[in-house]
């Protein structure tokens, strides 16, 4: 059962007591991500994530990792478009020291010039590595054409130029602006009671009051009028594609219909895309679709890797499956399997303390609430074939189509000319 408490400073604590587990997963969620950055600051949220592992007055970087790993636990972090999360998983008996380490990292950073300059080459190598992975980098290219000249269209990791431009003042100012207590959620799941969690957190922020509001992120601008296709020529063994349409924001009333639609479309090995692209036509080893949701927009993205001469047929078949869904070509059995898979994956995922912590933290920070899992299950069960058809018709339109491709494409005109319904 989940419980939520709010400190006078605005910091929220959410926990899920799982007395049958041996572990506890702890996350400190901060409302600072790629969407909070200006173009000149691109990558600063991710860079700060790196720096917080480099040491505090209490522990150096090595001691931070040893403090958790020496207990048999794991410690890590990640940056998203709308948040940054610092997390650990340990045996429940080590919760106190684990939170001490995480809070020490987040609250007592040392942004000295030497550490900043030493970390810049590391992040730039990460940028280079990422750009050498076309199956991943193609998604950044897709974001660039879906949301041009906007934060959602930039690489979360930044660019070599923006990383080089970072200095102590810009980093300190950014952290002070967004790492405010009312912009933080502490999420915990595992064998620990809520009162103990909240009482311990309060000890670290005793006497703190609510600070000034953090700046709002810019609303996304969506102005696409026709299909967009971008090809990045690269001498690779495979051609990698990412085909995307804009979809629903985080709280959209049709979000659970989209979840079922995505399952039917490309969410597993039983899906239409897998069966048609891989099993029937042998065009790709890996093909799938996924959904991302943000505060005011979202996306449904299909990705695949194939040989260059198979690319055109693969894109044609993906568009054909979109068209069939718009025409109501969904069977009752297909719908039932899709709903059961969506519910089953959610239920199975919530057997793990880490997955529950992630669900609680992201939901409370970004949506200001956590929908009961039973409500989600009920919403999925209510999805009908007519719902799938209606949502497919809303999303799969020519003026919503975007295609990014990396690889040795010999006939760009053919690809661009055929990229429409």
Image (cartoon, rainbow, N blue to C red):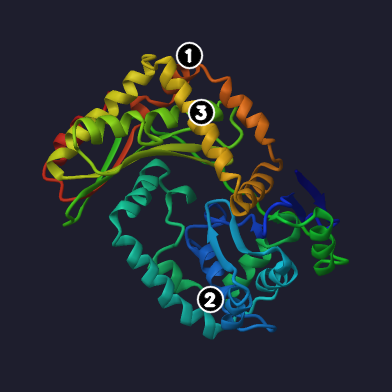
Residue 9, image x, y percentages: 82, 58
Of 417 and 407, the residue lying toward us:
407
Question: Foreground mark, 3 or 2?
Answer: 3
Question: Can you name the residue that lies furthest to the right here?
Answer: 207
Question: Foreground mark, 1 or 3?
Answer: 3
Residue at (67%, 29%) from the top-left corner?
375
Residue 146, image x, y percentages: 39, 41
Residue 420, image x, y percentages: 26, 27
Residue that carries the numbered disc 3 in the rendered image: 340
Residue that carries the numbered disc 2 in the rendered image: 167
Mark 3, Cα crowd under 10 Å, few <14 / some 14-19 / many 20+, is some
Q: Are marks 1 and 2 in contact (CB under 8 Å)?
A: no
Residue 85, image x, y percentages: 60, 59
Q: Is residue 210 visible?
A: no
Question: Foreground mark, 1 or 2?
Answer: 1
- Which of the two discs, 1 and 2, labels the residue nearer the N terminus? 2
Residue at (15%, 50%) from the top-left corner?
408
Q: Is residue 345 visible?
A: yes
223 vs 372, left or right, is left
Residue that carries the numbered disc 1 in the rendered image: 386
Mark 1, Cα crowd under 10 Å, few <14 / some 14-19 / many 20+, is few
274 vs 102, left or right, is left
């Amino acid at each position: 059962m989940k419980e939520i408490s709010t400190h006078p400073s605005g910091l929220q604590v959410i926990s899920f007591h799982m007395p049958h587990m041996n572990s506890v997963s702890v996350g400190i969620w901060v409302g600072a991500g790629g969407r909070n950055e200006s173009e000149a600051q691109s990558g600063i949220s991710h860079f700060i994530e790196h720096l917080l592992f480099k040491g505090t007055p209490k522990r150096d970087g090595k001691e931070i990792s040893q403090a958790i790993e020496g207990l048999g636990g794991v410690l890590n972090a990640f940056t998203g478009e709308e948040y940054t999360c610092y997390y650990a998983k340990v045996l429940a008996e080590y919760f106190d020291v684990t939170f001490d380490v995480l809070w020490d990292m987040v609250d007592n950073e040392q942004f000295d010039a030497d550490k900043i300059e030493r970390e810049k080459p590391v992040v730039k190598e990460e940028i280079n590595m990422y750009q050498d992975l076309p199956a991943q980098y193609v998604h950044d290219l897709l974001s660039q054409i879906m949301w041009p000249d906007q934060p959602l269209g930039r690489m979360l990791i930044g660019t070599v130029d923006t990383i080089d431009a970072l200095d102590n003042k810009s980093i300190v100012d950014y952290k002070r602006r967004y790492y405010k207590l009312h912009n933080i959620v502490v999420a915990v799941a595992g064998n620990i009671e809520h009162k103990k969690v909240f009482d311990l957190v309060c000890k670290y922020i005793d006497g703190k009051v609510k600070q000034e509001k953090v700046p709002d992120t810019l609303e996304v601008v969506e102005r696409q009028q026709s299909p967009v296709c971008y090809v990045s020529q690269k001498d690779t063994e495979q051609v990698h594609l990412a085909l995307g349409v804009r979809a629903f924001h985080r709280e959209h009333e049709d979000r659970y219909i989209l979840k079922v639609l995505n399952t039917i479309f490309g969410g597993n090995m039983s899906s239409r895309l897998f069966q048609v692209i891989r099993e029937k036509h042998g065009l790709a080893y890996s093909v799938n679709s996924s959904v991302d949701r943000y505060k005011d927009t979202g996306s449904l993205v299909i990705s695949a890797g194939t040989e260059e001469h198979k690319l055109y047929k693969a894109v044609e078949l993906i568009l054909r499956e979109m068209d069939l869904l718009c025409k109501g070509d969904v069977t009752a059995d297909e719908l039932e399997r899709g709903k059961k898979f969506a519910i089953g994956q959610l239920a199975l995922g919530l057997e793990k303390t880490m997955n529950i912590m992630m669900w609680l933290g992201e939901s409370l920070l970004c949506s200001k609430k956590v929908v009961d899992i039973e409500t989600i299950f009920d919403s999925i069960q209510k999805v009908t074939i007519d719902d799938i058809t209606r949502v497919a018709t809303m999303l799969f339109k020519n003026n919503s189509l975007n295609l990014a491709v990396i690889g040795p494409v010999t006939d760009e005109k053919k690809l661009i000319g055929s990229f429409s319904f």
